[in-house]
Image (cartoon, grey):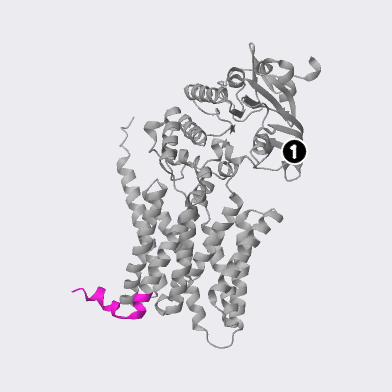
């Protein structure tokens, strides 16, 4: 009776994938909550895409992919800040120019590689079922590091997100905390690359927090709801992808998107019912 | 608090020039002047949110920024994201964060300070409300509670009484008066000349330069007013109303006439 649930658990690769995607879901939900409140969704998507040339270069040099991805993402974040200030451009314009340029560089380098490189496709769309033990351990370590930083600085990050002027006037290092958050986003993206891939990671970051925002008006509960979705959606998605023989990263993201849409429609329905029908005048 | 020969601005456009200003501890100060006259810029200089191009800023006996934990800054209401998922209690607790530092979570002393601050601003019953669900006056009260909970030596308030009801205005000013009588200093920008004249002990007339500093009766001086506002005054009976002010819509429109007072007429 329970075989649909228990059968895949007999495979080590499925257990590793389950663990990896649930951890990724938690870290993404936590960092994504700050991103959504700061309006950094587009920035997150940009950093993810700009990691691609780093991954390709790391592959060519046979180095660890996460170093290449992190270096490319952090360099892009710094460059976006620099171009915005020096070029006197809007932030989203600078992001648009640089992230497309970086992603194009990745595709360009990728296309120069003569033989088939299936591994690299995994980074674009995610291939969590193929995650090895060493990568899983690295993923756990980096995730714990990100969560530890947030555990130490959650209230400073919250204050600077809510009221950067008030926080700066009272002595919090707002600029440093802004850069720290960008760095945390970059590391989170690197952690998530194998699970959901460059193109879909923004959904893992933003969708749980966006869904939570529909449900609650308190930061603590927003985090709790986002993390809950961040754990449940990958588990459901991974099982679904196993039984449907579908791409795992995309299935996980689709579960999160479906959940968001259901919550949104329910909320609109409830909102309509609460609006007392006005008598016609 | 002392500013010496300060020039400051944004990009390449100066907003403040040749500012020399000294404010004694325990003062309750209103900064008034036209839009674009540099009121917010002056507050931000004191708060070390922007750096002067030249000159020196000394706050609470130290260079600006050094005494940040003794300062509470209340931003303009328009700059706050009211849909943010925080309650009144959360906002007031933020006043305690800087002194707590990283690692430490708010403890009983912090909760007591926040509860006391919320009682003082009359928001004890609304502590669990999300800030977006509050009225304009209640929002101001919540932010003042945050400032009080920080137990600062210097309050910096950008337009604290703009867009709030009269009761709230009276309550906020009474609170600031009681804080300053205890030796703390409060500096606020305001569009509201009536409020400035009535509630503040010291006023600073500002239009890129310091036009005048002195007791609040200065506001009733037509010479100071016309030099500060450059002539955009509406005179209704014996009351002067400033007309170049996008936020100032106290008087009902319709039928009233205004004229531009020209300096040469005096």
Quadrant location of the C terminus of chain A?
top left
Quarter residue A166 falls in: top right
Q: Foreground: B98 or A281? A: B98
Percent from the top left, x then y, of residue B196? 61, 21
Residue A163 visible in the current orientation: yes
- Mark 1, other Cα within 10 Å: few <14 / some 14–19 / many ≥20: some
Task: Give the side of residue B56 with respect to residue A40, left or right.
Answer: right
Quarter residue A6 falls in: bottom left
Percent from the top left, x then y, of residue A176? 60, 54
Percent from the top left, x then y, of residue A69? 56, 71
- Vertical comparison of B120 with A205: above or below: above
Percent from the top left, x then y, of residue B210? 74, 28
Q: Residue furthest left?
A: A1
Magenta segment boundaries in residue numbering: A1-16
Q: Residue at x 47, y 22 (%)?
A: B167
Q: Residue furthest top?
A: B237
Q: Residue at x 60, y 78 (%)?
A: A57
Q: Foreground: A69 or B260? A: A69
Report the label total: 1
Q: Subunit of mark 1?
A: B
Q: Which residue is mark 1?
A: B56
Q: Looking at the magenta stretch, what is its main secondary structure?
A: helix
- Vertical comparison of A72 with B178: above or below: below
């Amino acid at each position: 009776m329970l075989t649909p649930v228990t059968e895949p658990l007999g495979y080590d690769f499925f257990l590793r994938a389950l663990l990896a995607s649930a951890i990724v879901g938690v870290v993404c939900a936590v960092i994504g909550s700050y991103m959504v409140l700061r309006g950094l969704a587009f920035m997150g998507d940009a950093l993810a895409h700009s990691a691609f040339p780093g991954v390709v270069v790391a592959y060519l040099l046979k180095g660890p992919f996460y170093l290449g991805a992190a270096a490319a993402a952090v360099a892009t974040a710094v460059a976006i800040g620099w171009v915005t200030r020096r070029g006197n451009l809007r932030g989203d314009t600078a992001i648009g120019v640089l992230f497309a340029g970086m992603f194009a560089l990745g595709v360009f380098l990728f296309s120069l590689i003569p033989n088939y490189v299936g591994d690299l496709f995994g980074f674009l769309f995610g291939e969590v079922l193929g995650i090895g033990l060493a990568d899983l351990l690295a993923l756990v370590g980096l995730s714990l590091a990100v969560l530890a930083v947030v555990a130490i600085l959650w209230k400073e990050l919250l204050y600077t997100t809510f009221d950067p002027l008030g926080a700066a006037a009272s002595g919090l290092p707002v600029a440093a905390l802004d850069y720290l958050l960008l760095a945390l986003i970059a590391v989170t993206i690197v952690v998530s690359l194998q699970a959901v891939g460059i193109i879909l990671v923004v959904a893992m970051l933003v969708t749980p927090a966006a869904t939570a925002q529909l449900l609650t008006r308190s930061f603590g509960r927003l985090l709790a709801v986002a993390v809950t979705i961040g754990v449940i959606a990958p588990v459901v998605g991974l099982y679904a992808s196993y039984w449907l023989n579908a791409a795992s990263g995309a299935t996980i993201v689709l579960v999160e998107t479906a959940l968001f849409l259901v919550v949104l429609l329910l909320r609109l329905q409830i909102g309509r019912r609460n609006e007392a029908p006005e008598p016609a005048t | 608090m002392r500013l010496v020969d300060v020039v400051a601005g944004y990009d390449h456009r100066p907003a403040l020039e040749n500012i020399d200003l000294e404010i004694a501890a325990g003062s309750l100060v209103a900064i008034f002047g036209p839009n674009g006259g540099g009121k917010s810029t002056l507050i931000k200089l004191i708060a070390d949110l922007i750096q002067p191009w030249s000159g020196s800023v000394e706050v609470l006996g130290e260079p600006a920024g050094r005494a940040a934990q003794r300062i509470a800054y209340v931003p303009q209401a328009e700059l706050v994201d009211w849909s943010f998922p925080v309650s009144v209690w959360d906002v007031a607790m933020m006043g305690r964060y800087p002194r707590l530092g990283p690692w430490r979570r708010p403890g009983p002393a912090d909760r007591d300070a926040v509860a006391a601050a919320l009682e003082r601003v009359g928001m004890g019953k609304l502590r669990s409300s999300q800030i977006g669900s509050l009225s304009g006056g209640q929002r101001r009260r919540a932010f003042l509670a945050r400032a009080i909970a920080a137990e600062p030596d210097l309050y910096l308030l950008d337009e604290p009484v703009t867009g709030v009801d009269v009761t709230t205005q009276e309550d906020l000013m009474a609170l600031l008066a009681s804080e300053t009588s205890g030796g703390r200093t409060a500096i606020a920008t305001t569009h509201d000349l009536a409020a400035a004249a009535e509630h503040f002990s010291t006023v600073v007339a500002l239009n890129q330069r310091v036009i005048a500093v002195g007791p609040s009766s200065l506001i009733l001086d037509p010479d100071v007013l016309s030099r500060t506002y450059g002539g955009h005054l509406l005179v209704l009976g014996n009351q002067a109303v400033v007309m170049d002010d996008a936020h100032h819509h106290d008087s009902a429109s319709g039928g009233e006439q205004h004229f531009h007072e020209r300096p040469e007429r005096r």
